[in-house]
Structures are given as structure tokens and as C-alpha cells.
Image (tube, rainbow, N blue to C red):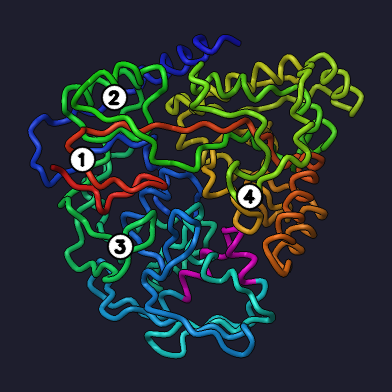
Amino acid sequence: MNRRDVLKSGLVLGTALAAPALARAETDRVLRFIPQADVTALDPVWTSVYVTRNHGYLIFDTLYGQDSSFAVQPQMVEGATVEQDGRLWKLTLREGLRFHDNTPVLARDCVASITRWSKRDAFGQTLMAVTDELSAPDDGTIQFRLKAPFPFLPEALGKLGVNMLPIMPERLAGTDPFKPITDMVGSGPFRFKADERVVGARAVYERFAGYKPRPQGTPDWTAGPKIVHFDRVEWNVIPDPATAAGAMQRGEADWWEQPVFDLLPVLRADRNLRVSTVEVTGNIGLLRFNQLFPPFDNAAIRRALVRAMNQADFMQAVAGDERSAWRDRIGFFAPGTPMASDAGLSALDPPHDAAKAREAIAAAGYKGERVVLMAPGDYPRINALCLVAADLMQRCGLNVDLQTMDWGTVIQRRASRKPVDQGGWSAFITTLTGADMYNPAGSLALRGNGSGAWFGWPTAPELETLRNAWLAAPDIAARKQIAARIQAQAFEDVPYLPLGQFFQPTVQKTSLTGTLQGMALFWNVRRG
């Protein structure tokens, strides 16, 4: 499929959706932001999409933060003690922390928040599996009694990626984690303005005057002091890239999170705009299978698609011919991170023979089952990847039903475990940043624990055994060896297809300074 055709298809779908009017006259204390998509799901525990994670960091503070070296640092936590040979952890909260409803943040709120989060997050599940008791012996202390030493405890609580651990009041954290929370009460630097919310068009955040930043450290990713310089942050959803670019050029918006690559030359030529990279760990595309039903419950069919796939086709659909903007031959750990290796990557080598894949799929017993691939028409880069995936599957002999919908519907529907003839799905595509794919402990998409796994619910006992061995490994050298075995096994089990890595630019007014890297963060950034 021609890359330009893919992009044009995505843009045409986008133009059918109305863009909100952006006011020209704004004060210097308002930051006007064009997000990657609407924040359809507000609860960052219930969903793992990045737009909700970004929204979550505005509203909710975290016990720990993570810096650009992937090290975790205390955030809401003042400090911690470790006793009984690593089996007893006591975390002390900073004094003066308050929720947006003006109630104090207490340890029991944190315990309830950790408990809820741990049922949805891969790292959280692992932490609770080694926890005998999680309690709040007093209002300022969170206590973990562990079955065995678990040195990754702070890393689990403070990881940057999805699902983030949002600290919320106990009354909200008691909600079933498989039901979304809509009452957004956190203790983070901004309050959510529910009265100004327009679904599909607008979300507004107001500076929380009662927020108490960490007094020490240097702002770096989600670690260090969170100093806010804007009274309001307004998210205005503009699905059509050309309209978004026009808003930036006319000064109607300050920051467009994810401009499409084809418009970068125009944006770079505007002296009032600056194009840069914030997500420095890159974005890795992945095609996720529903392994509960045919045909993708069959690993042989998934492996046949690996052999036929050319990652360059997917990356060119997103990033074009700007070769420095993307990489292929990408495995299951982000390049440049300690666990990355070449193990199993020969599965991605040419020839990418769809005819042979068709034969292998037929030999594996494919019976022509309908393959429902969900494609978000309002999310250009993912829609482009879906169009390439549909073409690949069709050439490999699969009966593809490409269903276009908005991104909010995709993230709602992917939670369904029903068969396709009852409104279920067979595959979807998303992207994860390197911050979510740098080790097997926190890699949501690498779990093989069946019904407890991420959407798609793969059962992969060997992957789980190797993951446990990685967690128990005595040092970094041993962990690297096991990670290589995990990647080789993943090319056998194929929990998803890795589609390559690209580096998504962002565009801002040149008047904005102090933007942090890692993700779209709204503290430290200022005007002038």
C-alpha cells in the first residue's frame, strides 16, 4: 500500500469530524493544548491509553516519580525504611498533602489506591503477588509486609508508563477497578473542570492552589518539583491535522502534541513555532491479537504474520521517508534500553513473503473466520498503521473486516471478551513508548497470564516463567540474559506484532520554555 494513500485516507476520515473553535484572545496564564485524541476515558487505572495517562498526571500525584535514567525518586513519599532483610517496607508521606476537595491525603487513601491499581497493572500485579499485607498503621505511613524481598517496589509504584498509580481518596479508590471512575479528585497540580468538559471537543484543568510541590530535586520526567506556571490548561481536540496546523500557525493554540509527519516542513518553516521531540524513548507500534477466539488463538497463524510483515511498511505509513525518524527490526524491548538485544530478530528478516504466509496459515487450520480489525478514524497515525495491517492480513489470506470508529470507541470496545459476531474484536493497533517497554516487569503487553493479562488475554506459561526468573535474577548481567530468552520466546508465542519504532515530534510556540521530556507534562513549562 502506498504511504501517501494511507495518510490521505486517514486525513479524509479526520476532516469529517468537527473541530472546536479556538479563541484568539487568551491571557498569558492559559496554555492551549491540542492533544493526540480526546480523553474519552478519564480513569488512568481503568484504561492504559496515553491520553488518559497524560490527563492523569495533571490531576493525580504519585508516590514516586521516574527520571530520564529510569531511576525512581520520592514524590509524595518523604522517605522509606527497609527492614527484616527486605521484607518490611515503611513509606512515610510528606506532610501537608491535600486532595482537591480540601481533605488531607492519608496513608489509607494510598493503600486503597495501590490496591485498586494493582489489579490492572502488570507491575502492580507482581508487587501484590509478593505482598503478605499492605496496611496503613498510621495516617502518615504505608506499610508493605512481603513474602520475599522485592527491591523493585519503588519502581513499581513510580513507573512513568501506563497504568500510572494515581493516588485518590479512599472513597473513590474503593471502586471496582474494572469500572471507570468519573469523579476526578486527586492531589496533583491541577483540578479537573468537569463543568467545562465537552466530550469529543474540550477538557479544562485549573491550577490547584493547595498543591504542595516536592521541595527538593530537579524536574526530570515525573520526578522532582512540579512547579506550575499556568492558571489553566485547555485541551482542544482537533482531529483534522490540517486544521490543527492552521490553529498553530494563527496563534490559536500553544502546543500540538502529535503533528503528522507530512506537515512538519510547513511547521518548521514558521519562525513562531518550534518542532522538537518530547517522547525521547520513541513510540513502538504493536498489533494486538484477541487470543480468546479463532483465528488468533492459534500461535502458528500469529507466527506466519511475523514472517510476512515488513516493519518498514508500517513506519513509512506514519513517518514517511525521513529515515532518521524511524527504525525497523524492533523486538519486544525498546532499543537503547538495558534489556534490548538481537535475540529472535531473525524472524523479521526478509523475504517478507505473503504467499508463503498464506500457505502456512491454511496449513495451521484457518477456516476463513472473520477478522475484525478496529481502526480509529480520528487518530491519524494509528489509523495509518491499521490500513497497512489490513492490507497485510488480506494478502496473507485472512478474511479482514476493517471497522473504522473513533478512538474512544476502540478503547471501550477492546475490553469486550465477546466473539466478533456479538460485537467483539480480533485485533487492534496502538503504540507504546520505550518507557513502557524497557523491562519485562512493567511491560503490559508482554504478560502471558491469561484472563489477568492486558486486552487480548494471551496465555503464555513460558513467558511467565521467564518473567519470574528475571524478577528473581541476582544482577543486571543475569537479567539481560533472561531478557534475551524472553524476547526469543515472544517471537514464538507472539503476544503482539511489533511494528517498528518512530520518534513522534511535537510542535510548540517558540514563546514556551521549560518543556520537560518523557511525555506531555504541564509543570515547569512557562511562557516567555
Q: Position of residue 90 (x, y in %)?
A: 49, 84
Q: Earlier in the sequence, mark 3 or mark 1?
A: 3
Q: Is residue 485 left or right of residue 7?
A: right
Residue placed at 13% from the left, 31% from the top?
Answer: 23
Mark 1, secondary structure of its residue: strand
Cα distance in 3D space between marks 3 and 1: 22 Å
Q: In this view, does 79 lie to the left or right of 478?
A: left
**Disc 4 vs disc 3: Cβ atoms closer than 8 Å?**
no
Q: Which amino acid does label 4 sit on?
A: Trp
Cα distance in 3D space between marks 4 and 1: 37 Å
The residue lying toward the viewer, choosing from 276 and 116, is 276
Q: Residue 244 carries which label?
A: 2
Residue 119 falls in which quadrant of the image?
bottom right
Task: Give the residue number, with chain letter if any, for mark 4.
Answer: 454
Within 10 Å of disc 1 (Cα), the crowding (few <14, some 14-19, many 20+) is some
Mark 3, secondary structure of its residue: loop
Q: Which of marks 1 and 2 is nearer the N terminus?
A: 2
Q: Position of residue 298 (x, y in %)?
A: 83, 36
Residue 341 falls in which quadrant of the image?
top right
Looking at the rendered image, the disc whose residue lies closer to the viewer, 4 or 1, is 1
Looking at the rendered image, the disc whose residue lies closer to the viewer, 3 or 1, is 1
The residue lying toward the viewer, choosing from 184 and 287, is 287
Mark 2, secondary structure of its residue: helix
